[in-house]
Amino acid sequence: MLLSIVIPCFNEEDTLPETISRIEAVLKKIDSYSFELIFVDDGSKYKTKQILVEKCKINKKIKIVSFSRNFGHQFALDAGITNAAGDAIIIMDADLQDSPEEIPALYDKIIKDKYDLVSGWKQKRYDPLTKTIPTKLFNWAARRASGIYLHDFNCGLKAYKNTVVKSIEIHGEMHRYIPVLAKWAGFANITEQVV
């Protein structure tokens, strides 16, 4: 299998149908990829799981990992990555803050350009200053401490070689530091993609 897309979900019934539709449309255009969509329902209380089950009946490439209660974003990511079989693994949020149309470029950087890790970089953010200033400080500190020059360590849209993301241990909120952990594990071919 060439591509796994891991999508954690928590009460995403408002955006989930459009998210799935847009991902499927993108993947139809690049149907030479063998792929799977892994949705991790992180204990949603409303219709998220029901929507996923219905979509799974229609599209056999959709897989569902379901938690009995909310364990948090990181546990959902870990479960999705653990179940991913693709040579390239892309993680993205279900709320459409990440554009499914970015999938081909991320995939190409991993498979064709042979990068170990590709981090999304949202150049234009529409967050309030109370969020953008701490984010800029965090990114600056992460660059200084790690020697990895990424503009946006916090971007939820990332792509990895399977061997990279499965060779590092991630606990708690460490998903923000996956590029650093990957570098420490010897995977230094890291880049970013404007998303």
Image (spheres, rainbow, N blue to C red):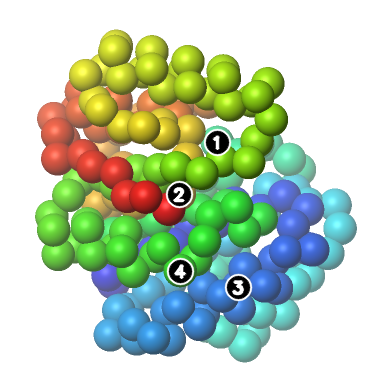
In the rendered structure, which amino acid carries the disc numbered 2? Leu
Callout 2: SS? loop
Residue found 46% across the figure and 44% down from its top: 122
The mark closer to the camera, 1 or 3, is 3
Residue found 65% across the figure and 24% down from its top: 129
Cα–Cα span, label 1 and label 4: 24 Å
In the rendered structure, which amino acid carries the disc numbered 3? Ile
Callout 1: SS? helix
User: From where the camera sits, is residue 81 visible?
Assistant: no
Cα–Cα span, label 3 and label 4: 12 Å
Relative image position of residue 114 (x, y in whole percent): 13, 55
Residue found 78% across the figure and 70% down from its top: 50
> In the rendered view, does 36 fall on the left or right side of 160?
right
In the rendered structure, which amino acid carries the disc numbered 1? Gln
Relative image position of residue 39 (x, y in whole percent): 58, 61
Q: Residue 101 bears which disc, if any?
A: 4
Q: Residue 157 bears which disc, if any?
A: 2
Q: Is disc 4 surrounded by few (<14), some (14 to 19) or many (20+) residues within 10 Å?
A: some
Relative image position of residue 6 (x, y in whole percent): 48, 57
Q: Is residue 144 above or below residue 119?
A: above
Q: Earlier in the sequence, mark 3 or mark 2?
A: 3
Q: Earlier in the sequence, mark 4 or mark 2?
A: 4
Residue found 21% across the figure and 39% down from its top: 190
User: From where the camera sits, is residue 136 visible?
Assistant: yes
Relative image position of residue 148 (x, y in whole percent): 24, 25
Callout 3: SS? helix
Rendered image quadrant of residue 98: bottom right
Q: Quadrant of the N terminus?
A: bottom left
Q: Mark 3 = which residue? A: 20
Rendered image quadrant of residue 126: top right
Q: Is residue 122 above or below residue 180?
A: below
Q: Residue 74 bears which disc, if any?
A: 1
